[in-house]
Image (cartoon, rainbow, N blue to C red):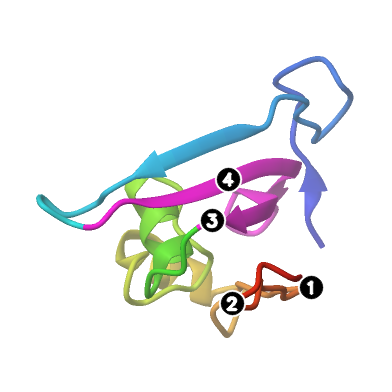
Amino acid sequence: PLRPAPSRRGGGPGSAEKPVTEAASIAEGGRKALTRVKVLFRAVQPTTNQAVSLLAISIETGRQHQIRAHLQSAGHPVVCDNRYGRETFSTDLQWCPRNFIHRYRLGFEDLSGER
């Protein structure tokens, strides 16, 4: 099990009160993409002492691998991501056997703007 990390903003163990917004174009000349990220919980994986975070992410554009690329670019790759998180992949495999990115809700607007 994970243990809560010390709070960075005074909201109690593992909490982060300030949402982070990231707008980025990773590659030179790449198309713009907007990813909104909010830290819900910070923790430490006890066997590797690796800091991890539970995030709520919303994307305004739908570029291929957008979430994974933006998180890696910010220095916080998805757990067990062999493509965008190679620096931490072998350590991640010690406690997580698969890529740890999951959705809890999927939504889109149709051509008329209806959700």
Q: Amino acid at mark 3?
A: Glu
3 or 2: tag closer to the N-terminus: 3
Q: Is residue 42 left or right of residue 86?
A: right
Q: Earlier in the sequence, mark 3 or mark 1?
A: 3
62 or 87, which is in the foreground?
A: 62
Total numbered badges shown on the rendered structure: 4
Q: Is residue 8 left or right of residue 11?
A: left
Residue at (75%, 29%) from the top-left corner?
A: 16
Question: Do callouts 3 and 2 mark residues in contact (Cβ within 8 Å)?
Answer: no
Instruction: Label 1: state its secondary structure.
Output: loop
- Specify the amino acid type for callout 2: Leu
Q: Residues within 10 Å of mark 2 (few under 14, many from 20)?
A: few
Residue of label 4: 36
Viewer-closest of 72 and 79: 72
Question: Circle 1 is placed at which residue position?
Answer: 104
85 left or right of 1 in image? left
Q: Which residues are magenta?
A: 31-60
Sequence-wise, the earlier of marks 4 and 3 is 4
Q: Which amino acid lies under the numbered mark 1 shown in the image of this protein?
A: Tyr
**Separation (CA) of disc 1 from disc 4:** 16 Å
Q: CA distance from mark 4 to mark 3?
A: 8 Å
Instruction: Look at the numbered discs 1 and 4 and tell me whether their residues touch, using CB distance below 8 Å.
Output: no
Quote the CA–CA distance across marks 4 and 2.
23 Å
Sequence-wise, the earlier of marks 2 and 1 is 1
Q: Which residue is found at the position 71% from the left and 74% from the top?
A: 103
* Mark 4–mark 3 CB contact (< 8 Å): yes
Q: Which mark is residue 60?
A: 3
Q: Quadrant of residue 1?
A: bottom right
Residue type for callout 4: Arg
Residue on which the image places disc 2: 111
* Percent coordinates x, y for residue 83 in the rendering: 32, 75
